[in-house]
Amino acid sequence: MAPAEALSPSALLQLLWLASPALPVGGFSYSEGLEAAIESGLVRDDVSAGDWLLDQLKLALARADLAVAAAAHEAWQQHDLVRVTALNDWVRQTRESSEMRLQTEQMGRSLQLWLLQRQPQDPRVVALGSLAPAPTWPVAFALAALHTGAPRREALLAHAFGWAENMVQAAIKSVPLGQSAGQRMLARLVEALPAVIDATLQLPDDQRQACTPMLAILSAQHEAQYSRLFRS
């Protein structure tokens, strides 16, 4: 690995802001199929929930959203709108259920509006809003992270930690679990994150993929689930 770039206090604070559940993009309202996995009996306690989320991190997030965010970070830095558009299209076209697609589009739109309030002078923020039919979450996050001035690896760590914290909270509410169990799950995810991010940064474009059949089936079942707390 190359030596890590210095992370300024300002960049660190802004990354913490982006990773926070308080960011007004609605990430807390999604369980990404976890609620359906609980309903089906695949997830029953903090151990099975932790196993599920670790698998999702390594098999889904690392190979798709994190890989797109890494590529989009570089494309935004180079003002390469053609590349950004292609990445945005890839995210939309590879979502395996309508819930998954609606989530990435809603969160992407919300983050673009947030960025527009903070960086109205940047033409890339306007270009983000012009992506049709909507900007997607990892593409929007990449631009927001670029504005912090943080290196790409740290930006991806923030992206992944924000996902982990939201998903652990979804498990706590849905299983349900206590706060101590949630902290054990979060500890497992945090321990895995650095190696996952390093692998993502070395992933060639032609190995980026979104193929999680069980998750896709559960997501589709969640659309008609009788009792649910979350939007996915």
Image: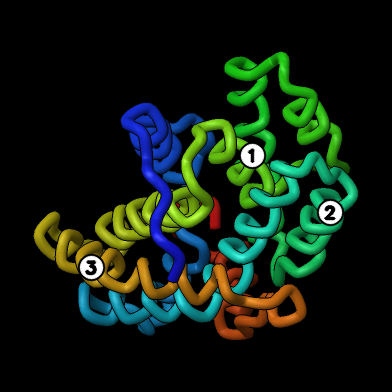
Residue 112 x/y as whole percent? 67, 31
Q: Which residue is mark 1?
A: 143
Closer-to-camera residue (227/65):
65
Left or right placement of residue 126 versus residue 107 in this view:
right
Q: CA distance from mark 1 to mark 2?
A: 13 Å
**What secondary structure is marked by label 1?**
helix
Left or right placement of residue 35 versus residue 64 in this view:
left
Residue 90 x/y as whole percent? 80, 63
In the rendering, which numbered label is found on residue 185?
3
Q: Which residue is painted at 38% across and 74% down in the image? A: 195
Q: Which residue is mark 2?
A: 83
Asked if residue 213 shows in the view, the reply is yes
Q: CA distance from mark 1 to mark 3?
A: 29 Å
Which tag, 3 or 2, sits closer to the chain's start? 2
**What secondary structure is marked by label 2?**
helix
Above or below — where is 139 with respect to 172?
above
Residues packed near mark 3 inside 10 Å, few (<14), some (14 to 19) or many (20 plus): many
